[in-house]
Amino acid sequence: MAPNLSSSQNPSNRFTLMVSGEDVLDIEDSEGINVPPQGLPHEKFLLGDLVPIAPVLLLGQLNQPVNPQEIIACLQPIHLHATRDHLILMGQNQIDLTADESASLLKAALPFIEEDFKSSVLYQGQHYWFIPAGPFSSLATHSVDQAFGRNIDWWMPRDSHEEGVAKRWRKLQNEIQMLWHIDPVNEAREIRGLPSINSLWISGIGKLADLHSPQLIQKSQWLYGEHPLLAGLAKHYNIVHSTQINEQALGNAFAWLENPLDAWPMLSQALIEKRLQEILIIDFPHGKKRERIFTAKDLHPKSWAFWKKTNPLTWKEIAQQ
């Protein structure tokens, strides 16, 4: 059965589930030149067209306000895997970087970073470091989530309206790569058979004032999911956040889950038991936002054998529609 296209408009009886989307790679700039899209579809949906990832991530890490007008950059220690003719960025979940290793690498690189950025690091975490973007504010960048697993040539930071900034970033990046190549952290990782931390990635440049989340997010009572962007959004909009879904608080909730398959049996059962009136699923086929509303009636597809009771739709079946 096809899902409904209209909603009850009563958010207290609705659960919203967002699924991560892939980008579309055939975008051209104003001069007709192919350029990487700025932000993954779900990042743009959550944050707005300017995709200010860094300040939102930073807000989620801090117990104090973030200056809404300060342009922030996110720095991440990464591994670039060399193939025969290009480099591929590995995802953060593939490199097993510990908090102690991250702190040690930052300590070594800190003088170079703060000299070139002309500012001090605002916050250092295990996977993210944050600093005022300063002279690198105009760089066009892409998140690790968007660029990992791909040839980085196309995803490296680019100049936008100010020439020479990307070149200055590459110089700093090269200096840090040489520094970390001989760092004891990487010597120890090599002995343990782990990929070296051989480069630094910059992304998410923006200011909190550029955040424009949809009303659906802003008016939610609960945000569920492990991605650190959700923690920042929850603080900004004063919404309760949890990494795990509370079965007693499903109404007017928004979830972005790493594995929706695990949550679907509980959510569909809530529909059947009328604890929820509808589930709104947001996904991004071919990079375009799609919204589908499912009610209890939609869970049971029509069958020519009308006398037989059908099983509720599985998550696999819904994802393939």
Image (cartoon, rainbow, N blue to C red):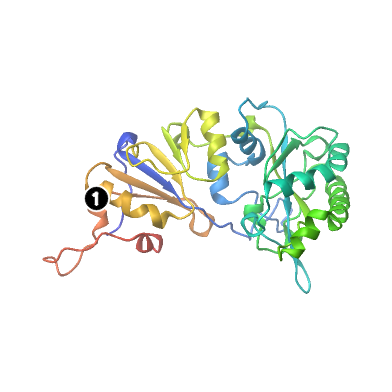
Q: Mark 1 points at which residue?
A: 296
Quadrant in the picture for the N terminus: bottom left
Compared with 80, 267 (above or below) is above
- The residue depicted at 40 percent of the width and 60 percent of the height is 319
Residue 198 appears in the picture as rendered:
no
- Horizontal and vertical percent for residue 301? 24, 61
- Tell whether 41 sits left or right of 129: left
- Identify the residue at the far bottom of this view: 84
- Tell whether 223 sits left or right of 296: right
- The residue depicted at 35 percent of the width and 54 percent of the height is 264
Determine the secondary structure under disc 1: loop
Compared with 15, 85 (above or below) is below
Residue 217 appears in the picture as rendered:
yes
Q: Quadrant of residue 147?
A: bottom right
- Horizontal and vertical percent for residue 76? 72, 48
Q: In which quarter of the image is residue 195?
A: bottom right
- Horizontal and vertical percent for residue 257? 47, 50
At label 1, the amino acid type is Ala
- Horizontal and vertical percent for residue 170? 85, 51
Q: How crowded is mark 1: few (under 14 residues within 10 Å), some or many (20 or more)?
A: some
Quadrant in the picture for the C terminus: bottom left
- The residue depicted at 80 percent of the width and 60 percent of the height is 187
